Amino acid sequence: MILDGETLDLAQEVEALLAAVPEDLDGQVKPELFRSVLEVATSPCPDVSSAGRELELLRRTVSGLAERHGLLLAAGGTHPFALWEDQEIVDRPRYWELVDELGYIVRQELVFGTHVHVAIEGADRAIYVADGIRRYLPLLLALSANSPFWRGQRTGMMSTRTPVFRTFPRCGVPPHYATWEVYSNRVELMMRAGAIDDYTFLWWDVRPHPKLGTVETRIFDQSTRVEHTMALAALTAALAHRLCAAFDSGEPLVEYPSELVDDNKVRAALRGTDGDLVDFYRGEQVPAVEMARRLVDQLADHASELGCSAELEGILDLLDAGTGAHRQLRMFERTGDLRGLVGEIASHSRP
């Protein structure tokens, strides 16, 4: 979020920041739909710790650029009091095409998220990994929840970003594809029908990304603290590693009903880690915190093999000290001041 340094309102200043970005970061600092939004992206990194160091550098660099322009940057799933009606569209053909196609649906999408790409070798292997991550999407959302305010109101949800983005077509919990052949045939059918230009217009919560050779997990609210972003990245990488091992050993993958995964996702958006989620293996509801601790234990060896055990331990901080949504609510309860809350978010966003 690009903020006016004094009022903490969203500022329509992305072009000024882009013009000031050093050449060595070309392509890693980008615009998004609105002129009040800045996207940063690491280059392909060999491991989670390398990605973390690069993300810290990116955040420090763009924060410094913003401050020199009288601006601040803040990371969260939503801006607590901004209105989408006040935001200006970035002057790029792709975004105006989206506005022309989707109108109100895209104009009210004033939300902020994180995407984690994990390189996967082999087409069917990638589909297996995406199908496997699919059942964990609600838990990943609960851990990342960081948007309890919207348009100046406390919504009663831990991830208000989730229902805002839900209005988009071709988003949310993806189908269970099972094989590359099924996936590619379904994408080609939509392209022939003129529904999409290519697969990147399928905005699923997790999707294969063939052009990059990755599986991309897109469920996360934007984390305020870099260490929480890296904890979620480590969890995603370790989970993908575990699923790759299962694929290589010929372990069959159960297809869980989309309506049940989606029901869990709504629970996660409402209550975050405070609520219960359906455990598919046990066929009953269990506390999300219990499910998360069990998953971290199950992934410990995979994280060790990937060299991201320290980053994965950040998940325990989200469980013990609270998610981003918990922290926002505690800050607000101390003062009742939403502008002060935005200032706190900005201060914790800078490494």
Image (cartoon, rainbow, N blue to C red):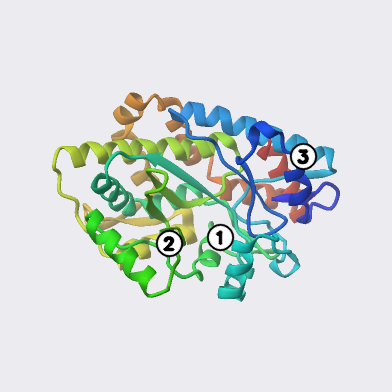
Mark earlier in primary sequence (2, 1): 1
Q: Residues within 10 Å of mark 1 (few under 14, many from 20)?
A: many
Which residue is label 1 attached to? 161
Callout 1: helix, strand or loop?
A: helix
**Residue 198 falls in which quadrant of the image?**
bottom left
Tell me the amino acid under the disc marked 3: Ala
Q: Residues within 10 Å of mark 3 (few under 14, many from 20)?
A: few
Q: Position of residue 28 (x, y in %)?
A: 60, 40
Q: Nearer the viewer, residue 84 or 185?
A: 185
Of the residues tagged 1 and 3, which is closer to the observer? 3
Label 2, secondary structure: give it. Answer: loop
Labels 2, 1: front one: 2
Amino acid at pointer 1: Arg
SS at mark 3? helix
Q: Amino acid at mark 2?
A: Asp
The residue at the point 19 percent across, 55 percent down is 254
Quarter placement of the C terminus: top right
Q: Is residue 76 left or right of residue 137?
A: right
Q: CA distance from mark 1 to mark 3?
A: 30 Å
Q: Is residue 176 visible?
A: no
How far apart in space, not on screen, are marks 3 and 2 (Cα)?
32 Å
Q: Residue furthest front?
A: 192
Residue 27 is situated, as x and y percent measured from the top left of the image, at 61, 41
Q: Return the mark for residue 198.
A: 2
Residue at the (72%, 70%) spot, across then down: 85
Pick whichever of labels 3 and 2 is earlier in the sequence. 3
Taking depth in this image into account, of 91 and 270 the one nearest to the observer is 91
Residue at coordinates 76% horizontally, 43% vertically from top-left?
Answer: 19
- Position of residue 124 measured from the top left corner of the image (x, y, whole percent): 24, 48
Residue bearing mark 3: 20
